[in-house]
């Protein structure tokens, strides 16, 4: 018995060492299986790749893109690092078979990567698997004492879910093609495989229709993609193993359609492009045959443009007011025995589904479209949560999770990371039902993003979502995730993503000077308000005309400084501080305390900076309070109750949003203050 | 008399205040005339531009590009800031006339920009002047307490020289189209007007020829521009008021031509693309009629592709060895009474000039082509200097200065800035002769640049050259230049140039970690060796196959830290230190002293970092020595002679290049040490 226990313990210890080694590779998403070898394979200008086995243009291109990136990462010239026919190539790539002409849901993406000090071999059932394995190889590349190298390792890997997407809303703010392309590069790097392109909204219709040109001409402010550009993006995505699923939201979220074609709508019109955010009244008229005739032509045109099997019709958030106000629609509903607007929308969905199906496509829509009268082929995308998803799966529908993956809500990465598609009611589904849960999508709704800021809202947090959807379910160590996310974030910089590089220029513009050291001290601990608070607390209604050039647009969704500070404070308060933790906490607190004096002179020089003056004052006060609390703790002398009460009031005040920003270190400073009160203090009562 | 003196003094004082105000606008190049007004014009989302006067598509496009950039600088959405027909537009733009179908040398670029608190007016004789004025407007935009604004000001401006160029050598290292485009943006921003595209070299033939496809197929490693891309770049340049002058270097510097067409050469062949740097033997055979037949067809093809009036034939650095070794060529020379290879090359140039002229173009070449037997229409580009240029002007030839503007030589901006086309013998030319000096060109020879590093070798120093060529001759305050150059450098970042943004990623790659704070302390005071020392001191012969990923490739050509440190030391030693200078000097010295301890652990982890270990040790020693010297100075106690001698030996040793890098703070530390010796010390003897 003792032996068995020892053996088990040894095993566990061994596993955790191996796991630690695997984690130290800084791969993201973490592969299914990693077996460390010994030594490393040097990556120098003579590095070469040969392609064994099946050949296709897409594979050649994947290898070419791989070499471009490997050269970029190592600073090698383009005339080095060649594709060769030689069997002694540094890396031999072998795909057993090619890929489908149109990438399909569930195509095999698995791969096996073996690296020893003498060479590397990447084998996969398909070119798609090779693409994923090449990304792993790129992530493994590092600087060493022998030059650039990849460690000896054997990796067997395959995705947990077949649908791992990123939705980008280009309707509310137009996002230019080059921005989408660099985001496709980021997606490929973390093994996401679906770009869900939300192409129409109340605020803009973003794609050229040759059949109905007034859609883009009158509905887009001139900000739309030509069909050539669409084809270009689809080809770009395909080279990276990414499917492109278009979404045309209907019957609601469609005001921009009605500017050029008011007859589609249920109200009298005329319509204008919507400039504000929210849910609006305009909706298509589901009772007129002309509506379906229009959609038949339009969907036919778009089905020809987008090769993917899936076609997203949106279907969310119809408030029904235009339907209620239209006597003809009311009469129609009465005549057809429809008891409410849900029935009417269900009728609409059925009609649209037939059009989509006629064009050889599978319909996809948000939660609201789920009604048992639709065929079981359709896919439900859930913004409501895993329970809603489970309900769909039980009814026999396939589904995608997006609730919990809305990156516009400014949540920390760990909250997205903890969002598990097979949780809640979905955890109790039968294996058969669970298979219907195809995966999920990070969603970038664009009320508050511009081409300048969008990358910083998507990355690096979306990499954590990508890991949730790719890696085994038991991969969920938050510390490991954050450590690898930091490395991944810098790596993504190298792909041209601007999530890090846009920060300083935005702060410089706000401050009107290159000297933004003091502003950075403040901005580094700020985060935008969460969920929908920005909209709810806007001093004037936000519109698409307002510049997104404020401090709230520049600061990161998640403050690494605040997270690290909170961890150090937890150690201190828990009595298990590592060496260096207290000096680090003191240093930060002092810097915050003194920062207001540094920043003060800049406020009067910039209108955009002025709104954060109160935050700077609060941060300064938090710094002073935290230092005083630390002094009490160091002296082992409980802080006076009155002082504690006053300081906690300060913390509470400083925790409130100002200028739609939050000081993320306030709670940890509060912890320090409560700890300084000693164990018996009322300020640390359980009611707190 | 006294009154007159006072009046003059008042005038001078007044001028200098005005000049200081004008300089505080941070414009670069500094305009010819600036008259400050009072107040400012707010730049908000309602900002609008109307086009009065002459209309042409190029003007519309210039305004469109201006608005794109203004929105980018201010963070405004693309649906704000419109072109309007209204006479009450914020900015009214008026060009008296359009521009030539092909931009000509000497086309009027002058403009007048009047800004008051109620509006702005930009008038110019041509669209070109409008383009220059719009760039001035963009440079004036700043963050203020009222939001974004431009100051009230009246500017009258025109260029001093009509030819203000940047040569980019894409032969030795291929530079992709997107990199050239962002450099065109940078050129337009500082009012340069000629891209001189050095398209062929021993190491590569970089353009598609449909007549002679083996030129690019065998001479480029696949790295060349298609003719469509060339047209695209020319159109891009034209939209920015920039001419594109192609250079095809002949009869030397042409090995890459001979790989596909060995019959063009004077040697027996076969030829391969040259991988090393230097002057090589292969040269075209000037004695065969087939050579001229080939060039006639080739130049005809290229003359059709490049609309510019000028066609550069290179003509430099023919060592003549292939000619000497070829009996047929020797016989030809003898038969034609040619006494040396110069005569042979002159014959070649005459023949080529006729071909160029037949195609309606004006020939341009380097110094070597200058022979009185060529027509006076040709233009000489001088890499030898103003005297050579003056000689050409006296002979009736037009000329361009490039000597002194070679940005690959890693000189400080002030040295380029001090290079005056009308200096030396050129200063004594008659006005008529001086007019023949058309301007100059910054030259980016590309032995040691990659797409990653090229921007940092061109910018920001080329902006100082641009000012020399645009602004009045008496604009030469070096401090003002450096102050404005720093602002301009950051502004150029916003155009997508990577001269600043590539620094940290390159250091991170070298160090193999994101923690490059210590490496930056070192790298910030290093510069690459100057002139041709890198080539001369290369441990192995450098080739185009070698990666440019070393510390010498990452560090900046000019260390701002070293310049500022030297200035502070000069103040200290001169006894006129500003408050804060000594603490700043002490802080830097301490940081350098302590930095080695920080950096040491990183050396063993990176091969690329190891070569700078001796530099780090030397910097540390310099820091310690400087601090000790400062202590002696502060105590007013002369340092012991033996100590001074030992420290100066250290400085001398630390001043030597290592890893092809220089520690730029060594001389100033030497000054501190000598000063600490006291006035009578032998260490500060005049012999020093």
Image (cartoon, coloured by chain):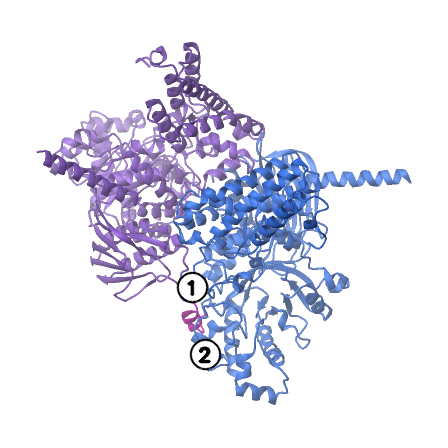
Chain colours: A purple, B blue
Q: Nearer the viewer, residue B331 or A446?
A: B331
Would you call the spot at circle 1 few (<14 residues within 10 Å), some (14-19), or many (20 or more)? some
B219 drawn magenta: yes
Q: Is residue A279 above or below residue A260?
A: above
Q: Residue A547's x, y, as percent?
A: 48, 34
Question: In the rendering, at what x and y percent does residue B304 appear?
Answer: 52, 68
Q: Is residue B492 visible?
A: no
Q: Which residues are magenta?
A: B209-220
Q: On the image, numbered disc 2 is attached to which residue? A: B262
Out of A196 and A342, give the one closest to the viewer. Answer: A196
Q: Quadrant of the C terminus of chain A?
A: top left
Q: Which residue is mark 1?
A: B545
Q: Quadrant of residue B259?
A: bottom left
**Helix, strand or loop under label 1:** loop
Of the numbered discs 2 and 1, the one sitting upstream in the chain is: 2
Q: Is residue B350 above or below residue B434?
A: below
- The reply to whether the C-beta atoms of the residues labelled 2 and 1 are less than 8 Å apart is no
* Chain letter, disc 1 residue: B
């Amino acid at each position: 018995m003792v032996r068995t226990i020892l053996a088990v313990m040894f095993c566990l210890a061994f596993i955790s060492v191996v796991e630690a080694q695997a984690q130290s590779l800084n791969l993201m998403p973490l592969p299914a299986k990693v077996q460390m070898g010994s030594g490393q394979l040097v990556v120098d200008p003579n590095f070469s790749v040969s392609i064994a086995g099946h050949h296709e243009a897409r594979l050649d291109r994947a290898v070419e893109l791989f070499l471009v990136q490997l050269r970029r990462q190592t600073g090698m010239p383009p005339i080095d690092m060649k594709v060769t026919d030689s069997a002694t190539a540094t890396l031999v790539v072998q795909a057993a078979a090619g890929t489908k002409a149109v990438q399909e849901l569930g195509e095999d993406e698995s791969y096996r990567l073996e690296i020893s000090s003498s060479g590397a071999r990447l084998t996969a059932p398909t070119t798609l698997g090779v693409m994923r394995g090449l990304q792993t190889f790129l992530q493994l590349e590092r600087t060493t004492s022998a030059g650039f190298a990849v460690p000896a390792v054997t990796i067997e890997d395959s995705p947990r879910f077949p649908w791992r997407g990123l939705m980008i809303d280009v309707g509310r703010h137009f996002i230019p093609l080059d921005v989408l392309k660099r985001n496709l590069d980021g997606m490929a790097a973390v093994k996401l495989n679906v770009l869900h392109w939300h192409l129409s909204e109340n605020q803009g219709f973003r794609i050229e229709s040759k059949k109905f040109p007034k859609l883009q001409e009158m509905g887009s402010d001139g900000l739309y993609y030509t069909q050539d550009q669409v084809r270009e993006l689809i080809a770009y995505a395909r080279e990276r193993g990414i499917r492109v699923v278009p979404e045309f939201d209907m019957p609601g979220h469609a005001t921009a359609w009605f500017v050029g074609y008011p007859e589609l709508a249920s109200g009298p019109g005329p319509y204008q492009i919507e400039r504000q955010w929210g849910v609006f009244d305009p909706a298509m008229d589901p009772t007129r045959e002309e509506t379906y005739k229009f959609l038949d032509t339009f969907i036919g045109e778009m089905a020809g443009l987008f090769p993917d099997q899936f076609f997203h019709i949106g279907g969310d958030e119809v408030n029904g007011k235009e339907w209620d106000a239209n006597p003809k629609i009311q009469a129609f509903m009465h005549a057809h025995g429809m008891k409410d607007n849900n029935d009417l929308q269900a009728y609409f969905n059925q009609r649209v589904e037939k059009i989509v199906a006629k064009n050889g496509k599978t319909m996809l829509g948000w939660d609201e479209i789920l009604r048992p009268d639709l065929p079981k082929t359709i896919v439900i995308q859930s913004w409501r949560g895993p329970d809603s998803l489970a309900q769909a799966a039980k009814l026999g529908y396939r589904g995608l999770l997006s609730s919990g993956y809305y990156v516009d809500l400014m949540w920390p990465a760990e909250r997205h990371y903890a969002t598990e598609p097979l949780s809640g009611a979905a955890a109790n589904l039968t294996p058969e039902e669970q298979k219907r849960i195809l995966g999920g999508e990070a969603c970038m709704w664009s009320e508050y993003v511009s081409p300048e800021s969008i990358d910083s809202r998507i990355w690096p947090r979306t990499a954590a979502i990508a890991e949730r959807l790719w890696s085994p379910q038991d991969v969920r160590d938050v510390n490991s995730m954050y450590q690898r996310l930091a490395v991944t974030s810098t790596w993504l910089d190298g792909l041209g993503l601007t999530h890090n590089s846009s920060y300083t220029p935005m702060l410089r513009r706000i401050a009107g000077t290159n000297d933004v050291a003091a502003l950075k001290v403040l901005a580094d601990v700020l985060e935008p308000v969460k969920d929908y608070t920005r909209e709810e607390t806007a001093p004037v209604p936000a519109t698409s005309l307002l510049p997104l050039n404020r401090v709230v647009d520049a600061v990161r969704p998640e403050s690494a400084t605040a997270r690290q500070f909170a961890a150090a404070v937890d150690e201190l308060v828990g009595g298990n501080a590592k060496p260096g933790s207290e000096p680090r906490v003191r240093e930060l607190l002092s810097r915050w305390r003194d920062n207001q004096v540094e920043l003060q002179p800049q406020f009067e020089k910039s209108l955009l900076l002025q709104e954060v003056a109160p935050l700077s004052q609060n941060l300064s006060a938090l710094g002073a309070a935290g230092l005083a609390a630390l002094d009490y703790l160091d002296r082992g002398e409980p802080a006076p109750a009155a002082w504690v009460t006053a300081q906690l009031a300060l913390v509470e005040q400083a925790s409130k949003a100002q200028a739609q920003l939050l000081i993320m270190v306030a709670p940890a400073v509060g912890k320090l203050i409560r700890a300084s009160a000693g164990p018996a203090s009322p300020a640390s009562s359980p009611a707190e």
